Amino acid sequence: MKFYIIAGEASGDLHGSNLMKGIYRNCPDAEIRFRGGDMMAAVGGTKVRDYREGAVMGLSDVLRKAGRLLTDLRDCKRDIAAWKPDAVILIDYPGFNLKIARFAHKAGFRVFYYIAPKVWASREGRIRQIRRYVDRLFIIFPFEIPYFQARGVDFVYKGNPLVDAIDSSGAMKASREEFLRSSGLPDRPYLAFLAGSRKGEISRMMPMLMQLADRLHSLPQYRDWRFVVAGAPARDASDYEEYISGREYVDLLFGRTREIVRHAAAAVVNSGTASLETVLLGTPQVVCWSTSPLTWFAATHILRVQKHISYVSLGNLCVNRPVFRELLQDDFNADTLESEVRRLVEDAAYRDEMLRGYAQIREVLGGSGASEAVAEAMISSLK
């Protein structure tokens, strides 16, 4: 069997790699051609294009790079048509992937969509495209079940693949001492900073994170603390140097994000899959997110964000309550951020209550084996 897989972001690369492992276990002679990242490449197959080459952040970035994105879309369609896969597997990334779904469906290829577009949050009109162009939708969150049922969308739910990814990771096995020794970090308490995987996210998060680091470092009780920035896999040191330069109490570390989070006293996390990983790793957190005024206006007015969605973080959505705080747009400011981080560190009862919420989130996500079960269901469907 031949599979063409498209992942457009770091989280898609993670889930795509685990799905590929499941495909190979269920179909050892499978041929896989993909657009993704290093994690997918490490599993096997043929990488056509790295997702980092086409990454965009927000509406303004889409408009600025429109010509390149259209060229990329055309090239992808040509590659699929020439290779003739048994199935095209699309992982999230709806702006690009729904256009590919339409093309692939009309060209006669089976279309599987793994990790549904977040139509329950905004742009609900995309459901019509899913019904029309997707043969089978594979969802990964329990709160999506009643949503898609009510809208007559055929789907498969096998649990969330992130549970397996975290529980089997080295971060859950290595001790704090082993991590500090292998990473070269000093044996001091530290905060983890996750500024996102896109350059636009980094440019908005890092100034505020460094302001937080400066404020806390100036306080006697935090004088010996470190502030560890987890470098995103899609970036390099040059993306962070202008912000970190001159701050000897700030460290930048690549390739160890989960370990950084696992052994931190608390984490400041850009909204996204990383916030759910932080839940599963068991580290208290505050989620932060901001964007350009144009994109914020589009999200809240033009795209008509669904009124029933009260949170942006997947963990909070899973239990429909604020297990951890979200600082969005104007609320993402130095005073509020410092107050929340200090509460995470200094208020033991607050931390304990958050960790009890984490246990509830983990429970509703379901057990292990999601990626393999999805791969098995895809192959079975083709047979």
Image (cartoon, grey):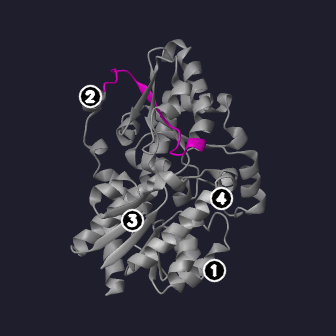
Amino acid type of disc 2?
A: Glu
| Between 349 and 153, the one nearer to me in the picture | 153
Q: Residue at x 38, y 79 (%)?
A: 85
- The first of marks 1 and 4 along the sequence is 4
Q: Which residues are magenta?
A: 184-200
Mark 1 surroundings within 10 Å by alpha-carbon count, few (fewer than 14), some (14 through 19), many (20 or more): few
| Between 132 and 314, the one nearer to me in the picture | 132
Q: Residue at x 57, y 30 (%)?
A: 209
Mark 2 surroundings within 10 Å by alpha-carbon count, few (fewer than 14), some (14 through 19), many (20 or more): few
Amino acid type of disc 1?
A: Arg
Residue 66 numbered tag: 4
Residue 177 numbered tag: 2
- Which of the 4 quarters of the picture holds residue 257? top left
Q: Residue at x 36, y 61 (%)?
A: 47
Give the total of numbered labels.
Answer: 4
What is the x, y in percent for residue 377?
34, 79
Mark 4 surroundings within 10 Å by alpha-carbon count, few (fewer than 14), some (14 through 19), many (20 or more): few
Closer mark to the observer between disc 3 and disc 2: 3
